[in-house]
Image (tube, rainbow, N blue to C red):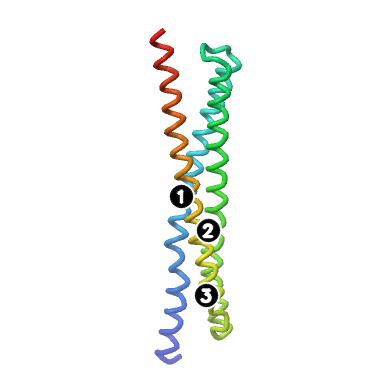
Amino acid sequence: MNPQEALDHYRILTSMLAPALLMAATGSLLVSANARLARVVDRLRAIIAQLDGGDELSRPELEDQILRHRRRAHLVLRACLMLYLGLGAFVGTSLALAVDALLGFRLPYLPTGLAVVGVLGLLGASLYLGREVSLSVKSFDAELDIELARRRR
């Protein structure tokens, strides 16, 4: 093997590993999103227990909280789906680079297209998670207002 061929192999391997950074970032966001989902589910269960236990809060207030937390759960779910799409696209990018090299670089748009899909998945997930965080703060504010009003009585 001549030195130029060896360099070409290293370039191909390097380009195949480049999506690994994005895969790691996506994995980190997935862990965070799943933790957020678990917290939302735990909070929903606590609110349902309050509803069943005849808590001092009125039924409409508790039902309003349940609706807000359901919306939060659905936003996190959509974010997770987008993150899984992104992760799959980044893995596909890495594989497409190898296949493209094996076929003599006849598929130049496939790896790039998959990378773009992956980045769009991350963007979509970020937007969903941003909306969920906003709704989380609004939910917290509403619950705090209810609690403060209850303590003033």
Quarter of the image where one finds residue 142: top left
Looking at the image, which residue is at 47% across and 49% down? 127
Q: Tell me residue 49's x, y (percent).
A: 57, 19
Q: What residue sits right under mark 2 in the picture?
A: 86
Q: Tell me residue 58's x, y (percent).
A: 55, 15
Looking at the image, which residue is at 49% across and 44% down? 33
Categorize mark 2 by other alpha carbons within 10 Å: few (<14), some (14-19), many (20+): many
123, above or below 141, in the image: below
Left or right of 81? Residue 149 is: left
The kind of residue on which mark 1 rests is Leu
Task: First in sequence, mark 2 or 1: give its number.
Answer: 1
Looking at the image, which residue is at 55% across and 86% down? 104
- Name the residue nearer the viewer: 92 or 147: 147
Element carrying mark 1: helix
Element carrying mark 2: helix
Element carrying mark 3: helix
- The furthest residue to the right: 52
Disc marking residue 29: 1
Instruction: State the CA–CA distance, disc 3 to disc 1.
Output: 25 Å
Disc marking residue 97: 3
Q: Tell me residue 75's x, y (percent).
A: 54, 42
101, above or below 77, in the image: below
Q: Are marks 3 and 1 in contact (CB under 8 Å)?
A: no
Instruction: State the CA–CA distance, disc 2 to disc 1.
Output: 11 Å
Q: Tell me residue 129's x, y (percent).
A: 47, 45
Categorize mark 3 by other alpha carbons within 10 Å: few (<14), some (14-19), many (20+): many
